Image (cartoon, rainbow, N blue to C red):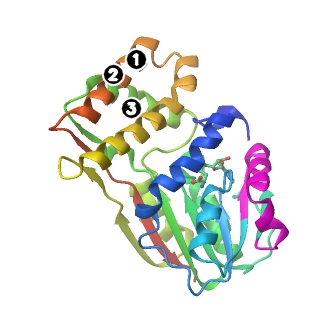
Amino acid sequence: MSRKGYLHGFSNKEQQRLYTQAGFLEPWIYENIEFKRVTNLLEVGCGVGAQTSILLKRFPHLNITGIDASAKQVAQGRRFLAREIRAGRVDLRCEDASKTKFGDATFDGAFFCWILEHVPDPLAILKETLRVLKPGAVVYCTEVHNASLFLEPYSPATLKYWFEFNEQQMKMKGDPFVGAKLGNLLLKAGFQNIRTEMVEFHFDSRAPKQRAEFIRYWTELLLSGAPSLLRSKRVTKDLVKEMTRELATVGRSQESVFYYRPMQARAEAL
Ligand SMILES: C[S@@+](CC[C@H](N)C(=O)[O-])C[C@H]1O[C@@H](n2cnc3c(N)ncnc32)[C@H](O)[C@@H]1O
């Protein structure tokens, strides 16, 4: 997969950010994920293996096959999980998730996290996942819904940058609002017993330390898109600076609020 199709890029810094992000968000993302009855899990868009290692820690009985379209991500994931791969607990492969080499009904569970926002045809990937799942297998998808962002104090430079971030992703044929569409997509792909819920990131003066940490994380996330946005002239260096300053203010202010809600779906294969 080329840099062109992926807003965050594949630099070492960005790969490290994925590990930090997965660890930081773990308590929220995994609160309702349950793979107790799964033995053979497909992780779609495994990136550098950041979620894979959390999945293995939380569900030590799992065998995980992770696939990612980027050879660079898979190579890093293989280095990171070398011990687990040697132990036969993990297999990482470079594959396009919309057209895999797996046979029908190979897996009894599937896991997606922050991938469908980056693909031109999420439905094709969900249909392909359904093909390789056994009947009754469970799938969890955690995906962004970027219309849900709210910040207090009002931060116009950040909102302008956010608008351009989302526009850029759509120009790259991704979908920053895919979270809200998960129900429709899973239904159309042929899954059953579909449940969706919002994951809530809502921090205010009741938890000032957590709020400040979250805003630091969010600033890094937004800045990870800056090289791509600057290259395509969607934003200026001044806007990036102003956004960074605004976010620092949000992080410090006594009255500040951070609010963002991605979506998590659970469904079963027919
Ligand atoms: C934001 S990263 C998330 C990685 C991992 N799920 C995590 O949370 O750390 C998205 C990943 O999806 C991969 N990807 C994008 N399109 C794909 C496709 N068609 N098939 C498989 N992987 C894909 C990218 O290469 C990238 O590594």
Q: Nearer the viewer, mark 1 or mark 3?
A: 1
| Magenta span of residues | 66-89
Q: Which residue is mark 2?
A: 245
SS type, badge 3: helix
Q: Quadrant of residue 247?
A: top left
Query: Which is nearer the eye, 82 or 198?
Result: 82
The percent position of residue 141, horizontal first and vertical second, equals 51, 64
The quarter of the rendered structure image containing the C terminus is: bottom right
Please report the residue visible at 57 percent of the width from the left and 42 percent of the height from the top.
Answer: 17
Q: Nearer the viewer, mark 2 or mark 3?
A: 2
SS type, badge 1: helix
Q: Which residue is mark 3?
A: 162
Q: Along the horizontal axis of the image, is 112 left or right of 24?
A: right
Q: CA distance from mark 2 to mark 3?
A: 15 Å
Hey, what amino acid is under mark 2?
Arg
Residue 267 magenta: no
Please report the residue visible at 52 percent of the width from the left and 55 percent of the height from the top.
Answer: 23
The percent position of residue 81, horizontal first and vertical second, equals 75, 59
The percent position of residue 165, horizontal first and vertical second, equals 45, 31
Query: Which is nearer the eye, 194 or 262?
Result: 262
The percent position of residue 28, horizontal first and vertical second, equals 40, 62
Can you tell which mark lies on residue 241?
A: 1
Pointers 2 and 3 in contact (C-beta within 8 Å): no
Please report the residue visible at 43 percent of the width from the left and 55 percent of the height from the top.
Answer: 179
SS type, badge 2: helix
Measured along the vertical axis of the image, is residue 191 above or below residue 206? below
Hey, what amino acid is under mark 1?
Lys
Pointers 1 and 2 in contact (C-beta within 8 Å): yes
Q: CA distance from mark 1 to mark 3?
A: 14 Å
Secondary structure mostly seen in magenta is helix
Q: Name which of mark 2 and mark 3 comes first in the sequence.
A: 3
